[in-house]
């Protein structure tokens, strides 16, 4: 690999200071002259026919301005997200408790909330469906199409029935997982400002500014060039600010358009819980077959996601789950069928891992059961079957050399002391300790299902004073994009890192770059920046060379560029001087870049072909303590190894790893959102428990960098990878500790206790 100055170093976060000292301007912090405030009026029941909405009482609240309903929508009343079944505001029917049915605008947030509570919604309750498996039955109440199926996919290869008939060992099991709430610190929010020419500018807390653009333009029936989306500093997304900020922003924009004044809409925590997307609850029936030597021969999967009341991103989340459903193994015979079902609950969407953690929990738990049946150590069993470079995935995709999966497994095996621990029963008093393993792969980027959106733009401006401004279409939401992209820019231009500034997204400065999801930012925006910066780099390098010659450098020596300085034959010139020279020569110091993901060949009919352009990989071992009297489990330590290509910033990568592991552990162990009769029971952080830093296990994290030729400086993507394999590793460790096999996440004490009784 070439010698790098900025990429591969733990340079300080660009946004560290403003976030640490509290000067960062989140949506709620922004103020404008004449600002009004909006609040949502929400459906109280799971499914209602709307009879009337009256603001007769709300009008009496001092400061009340107006009521906004679907009648105020100038555009088509369909939020443009994948299937377009979600209206901006419902006309006749609302489909889940918490759905916004109208908005109230007032001159203070308090008045708006008070008035919203006084809006009288007259409705008739309609029959509803709560359970996704029920929803798929023939006699279920229909809320979407003829069968309540938002989407469905298959992967079919070989002859599965035959392989099962001929197998030496088979296993089958049913698994389920519950919701996960994104629990970002900053709730959803947006501010819409009407422009003098009839246009609209929206400040939005979002990971997908171009989805917000699509929605605001549609709701207001405005051409795109009259709508501008400015991403505010975003206080966490984790997938929860992929689709829904478009709805929040559209609501703010409808209020601003009606009143002609700036309108701010900031969600309270409870309404955020009730109405914003979640990780889909999942249900899966998985079966594996192996031959006498322990080689996997077949896999059968039925996988169902609870989509909630509207389709939103369910199809895309389900597709990712489908592709990865058999696990990272060589298997000749595969039959995978998946469904996203409609229910009258909160619409589910993107969450770190995007439909993979649910099915990974099922299949990696079951792989352990199969290893046990085959009389093999779980790690040995995996090593026999795991994908290597040159192998084909279950979709028939041949893997290239950027696949370090087996090395990851060996690294974790060694570092965790697996071979010794796995067979040594350790019980002290009531506390049993055990160790569990998992392996996973992750298709980086949008893949075949999202290929039309898989492109990204960049704008690089080098000013006269040599400061560099970069605009991209992907968003910082805590993961460190501004920093990593600044490092890539600095590396390409040989500009000092301090001189580079990457801005939050402004939709008017760069073309639609798709969503900031699927861990695609480093790869996509990074490559777009390299494309934009390369011609500028050539000009800077040429000018630096000319200056060095003019200053009498020995031209027989090659020029080197490192750390923002150009050197040749004993002379040196810095980036600033070189840039100044470029401006003196009237060279073009501003360029655009555009990167399009390579082609994928996946066919939806049989699920065969290249699904993603490249994969990242992970291996996890978890050490867990179980109290045999109470069933309470505690994760003591996680060893993890990742192949995410070249690491651009080791410290940030470590942060992503630790955060991802903790978030995965939180989902695996604690998070338990409860619905009763179509109503969310615990929409708050008192009754919905998440792991905090006080619960964190000890971490042991290794990176094995398998370079990806197409990646920026050989990087792949890592944001979601660390979450995926945690739950099954923990479940397998619980089983190893005490014999309890829990097939449902969260792995609550009562479930462990119940299984303990059977041991
Ligand atoms: N890390 C922080 N701190 N905050 C976040 O919101 N989102 C995760 C992950 N890590 C997130 C995060 C999710 S869901 C994704 S898809 C990736 O970051 C996106 O970032 P990337 O595209 O830069 O990898
Ligand atoms: Mo991440 S769930 O792809 O935003």
Image: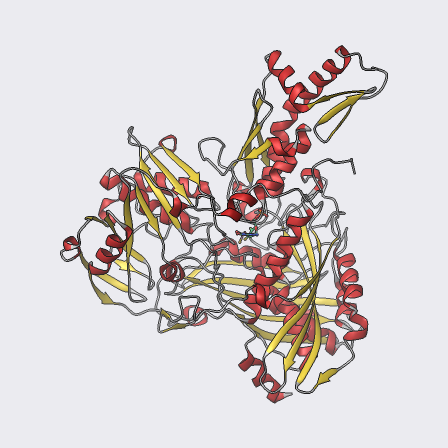
Residue 91, picture quadrant: bottom left
Q: Position of residue 35 (x, y in %)?
A: 28, 41
Residue farthest toward the front in the current orientation of the protein: 21
Residue 75, picture quadrant: top left
Residue at image location 71% in from the left, 21% down from the top: 541
Residue at image location 48% in from the left, 59% down from the top: 182
For this view, does 69 lie left or right of residue 227? Answer: left
* 135, above or below 405, in the image: below
For this view, does 580 lie left or right of residue 295? Answer: left
Of residues 161 and 414, which is closer to you in this image?
A: 414
Instruction: Tell me, yes or no, if residue 624 can be seen here.
Output: yes
Q: Position of residue 411 (x, y in %)?
A: 78, 60
Residue 223, picture quadrant: top left
Q: Position of residue 678 (x, y in %)?
A: 35, 70
Of residues 758 and 563, which is closer to you in this image?
A: 563
Residue at image location 24% in from the left, 37% down from the top: 260
Q: Quadrant of the N terminus?
A: top right
Give the image's coloring scheme: secondary structure
* 637, above or below 485, in the image: below
Q: Position of residue 309 (x, y in %)?
A: 38, 61
* 499, above or below 364, in the image: above
Instruction: Tell me, yes or no, if residue 145 can be seen here.
Output: no
Q: Quadrant of the C terminus?
A: bottom right
Q: How many numbered badges does the structure rendering display?
A: 0
């Amino acid at each position: 690999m070439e010698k790098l100055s900025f990429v591969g170093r733990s340079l300080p976060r660009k946004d560290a200071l403003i976030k640490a000292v509290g000067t960062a301007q989140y949506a709620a912090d922004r103020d404008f002259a004449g600002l009004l405030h909006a609040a949502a009026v929400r459906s109280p029941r799971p499914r209602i026919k709307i009879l009337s909405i009256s603001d007769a009482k709300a009008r009496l609240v001092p400061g009340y301005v107006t009521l906004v309903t679907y009648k105020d929508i100038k555009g088509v009343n369909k939020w443009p997200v994948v299937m377009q079944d979600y209206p901006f505001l419902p006309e006749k029917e609302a489909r889940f408790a918490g759905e916004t049915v109208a908005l109230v605008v007032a001159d203070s947030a308090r008045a708006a909330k008070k008035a919203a509570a006084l809006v009288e919604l007259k409705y008739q309750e309609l029959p509803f469906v709560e359970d996704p498996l029920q929803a798929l039955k023939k006699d279920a109440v229909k809320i979407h199409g003829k069968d309540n199926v938002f989407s469905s996919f298959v992967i079919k290869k070989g002859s599965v029935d035959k392989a099962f008939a001929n197998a030496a060992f088979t296993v089958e099991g049913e698994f389920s997982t519950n919701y996960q709430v994104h629990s970002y610190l900053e709730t959803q929010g947006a501010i819409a400002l009407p422009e003098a020419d009839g246009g609209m500018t929206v400040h939005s807390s979002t990971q997908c500014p171009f989805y917000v653009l699509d929605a605001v333009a549609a709701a207001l029936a405005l051409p795109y060039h009259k709508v501008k989306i400015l991403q505010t500093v975003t206080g966490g997304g984790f997938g929860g600010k992929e689709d829904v900020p478009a709805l929040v922003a559209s609501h703010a924009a409808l209020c601003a358009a009606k009143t002609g004044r700036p309108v701010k809409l900031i969600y309270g925590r409870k309404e955020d819980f009730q109405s914003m997307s979640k990780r889909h609850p999942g249900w899966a029936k998985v079966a594996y077959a192996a031959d006498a030597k322990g080689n996997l021969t077949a896999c059968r999967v039925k996988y169902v996601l609870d989509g909630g009341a509207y389709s939103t991103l369910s199809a895309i989340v389900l597709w990712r789950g489908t592709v990865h459903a058999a696990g990272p193994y060589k298997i000749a015979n595969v039959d995978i069928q998946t469904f996203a079902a409609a229910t009258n609950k909160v619409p589910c969407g993107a969450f770190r891992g995007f439909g993979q953690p649910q099915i990974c929990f099922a299949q990696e738990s079951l792989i352990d059961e199969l290893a046990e049946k085959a009389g093999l150590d779980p790690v040995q069993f995996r090593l026999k079957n795991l994908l290597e470079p040159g192998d084909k995935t279950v979709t028939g995709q041949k893997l290239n050399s950027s696949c370090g999966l087996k090395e990851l497994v060996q690294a974790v095996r060694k570092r965790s002391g697996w071979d010794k621990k796995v067979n040594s029963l350790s019980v002290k008093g009531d506390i049993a300790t055990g160790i569990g393993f998992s392996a996973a792969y992750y298709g980086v980027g949008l893949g075949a299902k999202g290929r039309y959106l898989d492109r990204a733009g960049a704008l690089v401006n080098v000013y006269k004073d040599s400061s560099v401004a970069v605009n991209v279409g992907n968003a910082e939401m805590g993961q460190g994009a501004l920093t990593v992209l600044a490092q890539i820019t600095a590396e390409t231009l040989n500009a000092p890192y301090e001189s580079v500034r990457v801005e939050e997204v402004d939709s008017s400065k760069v073309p639609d770059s798709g969503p900031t999801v699927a861990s695609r930012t480093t790869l996509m925006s990074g490559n777009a920046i390299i494309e934009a910066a390369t011609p500028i780099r050539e000009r800077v390098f040429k000018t630096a060379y000319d200056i060095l010659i003019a200053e009498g450098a020995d031209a027989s020596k090659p020029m080197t560029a490192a750390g923002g300085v150009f050197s040749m034959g004993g002379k040196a010139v810095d980036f600033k001087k070189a840039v100044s020279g470029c401006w003196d020569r009237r060279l073009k110091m501003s360029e655009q870049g555009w990167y399009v993901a390579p082609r994928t060949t996946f066919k939806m009919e049989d699920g065969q072909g290249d699904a993603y352009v490249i994969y990242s990989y992970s291996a996890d071992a978890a050490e867990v303590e179980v109290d045999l009297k109470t069933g309470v489990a505690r994760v003591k330590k996680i060893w993890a190894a990742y192949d995410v290509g070249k690491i651009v910033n080791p410290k940030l990568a470590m942060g992503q790893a630790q955060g991802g592991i903790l978030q995965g552990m939180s989902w695996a162990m604690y998070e338990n959102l409860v619905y009763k009769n179509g109503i969310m029971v615990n929409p708050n952080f008192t009754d919905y428990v998440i792991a905090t830093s006080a619960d964190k296990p000890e971490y042991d994290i290794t990176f094995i960098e398998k370079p990806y030729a197409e990646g920026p400086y050989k990087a792949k993507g890592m944001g979601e990878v660390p979450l995926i394999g945690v739950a099954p590793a923990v479940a397998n460790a619980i089983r190893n500790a005490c014999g309890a096999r829990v097939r449902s996440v969260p792995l609550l004490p009562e479930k462990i206790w119940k299984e303990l009784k059977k041991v």
